[in-house]
Each structure stands twice: as structure tokens, then as C-alpha cells.
Image (tube, rainbow, N blue to C red):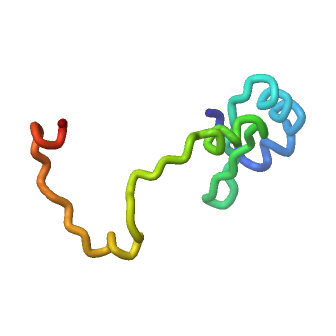
Amino acid sequence: MEKLTLTTLRHRLFEVADRVLETGVPVAIERRGRTLLLAPQSAAPRLARLKRRRLIKGAPESLVNVKAGKWRELENLK
């Protein structure tokens, strides 16, 4: 992924935008130590298309005091 400063983006805005739309590869833009991502809209909903899975049953409040057990290779792989 290419990284640009905001000043560079200003000078090459249309070129960068066209390239992102054509290739689908996002560009990171740095501004005052923070990063902004310029990506095509079609790339964003990938996570939204994932099937939601319920891996933990129960109330989230009950998980606060749960202690993790030891990993037992044979028992945990069954």
C-alpha cells in the first residue's frame, strides 16, 4: 500500500483517485501523525458480507471474571 502526505495528494489527487478506482488498492494518507485510508467503496463492504457467528453464549458481563484454562492438546482438539 502506498503512503502519501496530504500535500502530495493535493498535487496528484486525480491521478491517485483514478489509480485507486482502477486497481482497488487503497492509499494511506498521513496527516499530523494520523493515517487516513483512501479506498474504493466496493472494498469497504467485504467485512459486512461475512456471516455473523455466535461463538460465545451468555451475557458479556459474565465473561469479566472468567479465567482461562490450560491448553490440553488432546482434549482441546476433540
In the picture shown, does residue 36 fall above or below 13?
below
Task: Give residue 33's quadrant in the image.
Answer: bottom right
Quarter of the image for the C terminus: give it.
Answer: top left
> In this view of the protein, which residue sits in the foreground, 50 or 43?
50
Residue 62 point in image, percent of width and height: 33, 74
Q: From this view, report whether residue 43 is shown above or below residue 53.
A: above
Return the x and y of residue 7 as percentages of the image width and height: 79, 48
Q: Quadrant of residue 21?
A: top right
Instruction: Please determine whether, in this image, residue 31 is positioned above or below residue 76.
Output: below
Name the one closer to the observer, 15 or 67. 67
Q: Is residue 55 left or right of residue 65?
A: right
Q: Residue at x 85, y 45 (%)?
A: 10
Residue 69 or residue 21, whichever sits in front:
69
Q: Quadrant of the N terminus?
A: top right
Q: Residue 68, position in %: x, y? A: 20, 61
How many numbered discs sit on the rendered protein?
A: 0
* Residue in front for this viewpoint, 58 or 33: 58
Q: Can you tell which quarter of the image residue 42 is in?
A: top right
| Picture residue at 67% right of the left edge, 51% below the top | 30
Name the spot of residue 8 as percent of width and height, x first. 78, 42
Q: Residue at 33% across / 70% down in the picture?
A: 63
Q: Among all residues in the image, which is located at the extreme top? A: 23
Residue 65 lies, with reference to residue 39, above or below; the image says below
